[in-house]
Image (cartoon, rainbow, N blue to C red):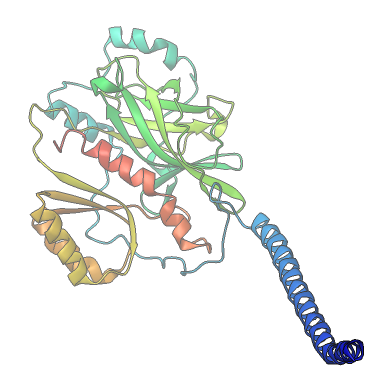
Amino acid sequence: MTERYLEMHSTSSTILCCPLSIQVRQTTSQQVLSMRTTFMAVGISALILSIGNVLLLLFRANVPTPEIERELPRMLPPAPPRPPPPYWQPRPTSSEKHVGAIWRWLGYESTKLSNETLAVLDCGLSHCPDARRPSVDKVVWVEWVWQLQYVGNERIYVYSAYYDDRPAAGHLPSIRVLALSTFRRDINITCAVWYDGVDRPYVVRAIVNYDAGSGYGFDRQIYREYAYICPLPTSRPIPTDISILGGPDACPGVAGYSTLVPVQRTPATEHQPIEFGVCVTAGYGFIEPEVLVEWVELNRMYGAAEINLYDVWYSENMSTVFNYYQGLDVLRVHALPHPRANHSSWFFNKVRNLRMIALNDCQLKCMYRYR
C-alpha cells in the first residue's frame, strides 16, 4: 500500500510540475526576445550616431577655421555709402610747409637737414636715387582715411604713421606704420622716409610685426593688420611723411609711390595733460542714444576724462550724442571705415579686421597724452 501510495504521489507531482515547467520556458523565451530587441535597438542607435559623427566631421572639414576666415554669407548688408560725418576727428595732412611749421612751433627748429645729417642718411638716400615724393594727385585715397599702394595684385592700405621716440622702443627712434595688407608675413616691406627739403627718400627695410592675426578673406585674398616699424638713423630732424612698398624690389619703379602718409607725434611732457583716458576698439551698428549716454557717464564716474571711439559704421541716430560730448571735450570719434566697406561679404569680418589697428592707433596717438 505504501509503495503504491508513493508511486501515485510521484505521478501526480510530475503531472503538476509540467504546466509550471512550460510557463517558465515561455517566460524565459519572452525575456530573451525582449533582450534581443533591446540589443538591436542599441546597436542601430550606435550605428546612426557613428554615421552622424562621420558626416559632422566631413561637414566641419569644409567650414572655414577661426585661423583664416574666408568669406561667409553676410548676416548684415554692407555699410551704405555716406559722406564723412562732421563728428569725425580731422585727419593730418601731407603739407611740407604745414608739418615743418608744427615742428618749429614745438621747439624742434627747422625740419630741413644739415650737411651732417645728410651724411648720416646718405646710405639710405642712395638706395632709390630715381624715386621722388608723390604729388598730391598721385596719392590714392580709399574711404577718406586709407592710402593705397598697389604692388602687382597685392595691396597695402596705410592708415596712420607715428614718430616713436620712447626709450623703451629702442636707442634710436622709429616710425610705426599701421596698415592693412594682402602681403604674407614673410614678404619684405620697405619704408620710404621723407624729410623736409630732400627730394629723395631715406629707404630702409621695415620690421614686420608677425603677431598681426590671421586675417580675413575678401576676393580670395587675406587682409591682415600690421604694425610696420621703420628704424631711423637719427633722432633729429623729424621726418614729415612716409611711403610704404612691399615685395622683393625696394624701389617703386616707373609707377612711383601712391602713398604719402604724414608722420604724427605727440611730444613728451613732464606731466601728461590727462590723467585717465579710454580707448575703445572698432565699433559699429545701431545703439540707442540713451544707452550711449549711460555708458559715457559711467566712464566719467570712473574717472575717464576723455574717450576715444573708432567708427567703422555707427548709425546716424548717435550723431547728436557724439556732437554733445565732443562739445564737452569728453569724446573723440575717429574715422575707421574698412577699405573694402562696399564689398558684399560678412560685415562682422570687416569690423574684426580692424580691431588691432584701432587700439594701436589710439595707444600711439595718446602715448604722451594720458598718464
Residue 312 shows in the view: no
Measured as percent of width and height from the top left, residue 194 is found at: 36, 26
Q: Nearer the viewer, residue 177 or 81?
A: 177
Residue sitting at x 26%, y 39%:
363
* Left-right relation of 309 to 184: left
Q: Of 138 and 45, which appears nearest the observer?
A: 45
Q: Residue 192 falls in which quadrant of the image?
A: top left
Residue for point 24% across, 38% down: 365
Numbered disc total: 0
Tell me if I can see residue 268 in this picture: yes
Residue 245 left/right relative to 58? left
Above or below, 31 relative to 244: below
Q: Is residue 28 above or below residue 174?
A: below
Residue 287 x %, y %: 27, 69
Residue at horizontal 18%, vertical 68%? Answer: 320
* Residue 298 or residue 169, whichever sits in front: 298
Q: Image height check: is 111 above or below 278?
A: above
Q: Residue furthest front?
A: 1
Residue 34 percent location from the top left of the image: 76, 80
Q: Position of residue 80 (x, y in %)?
A: 41, 68
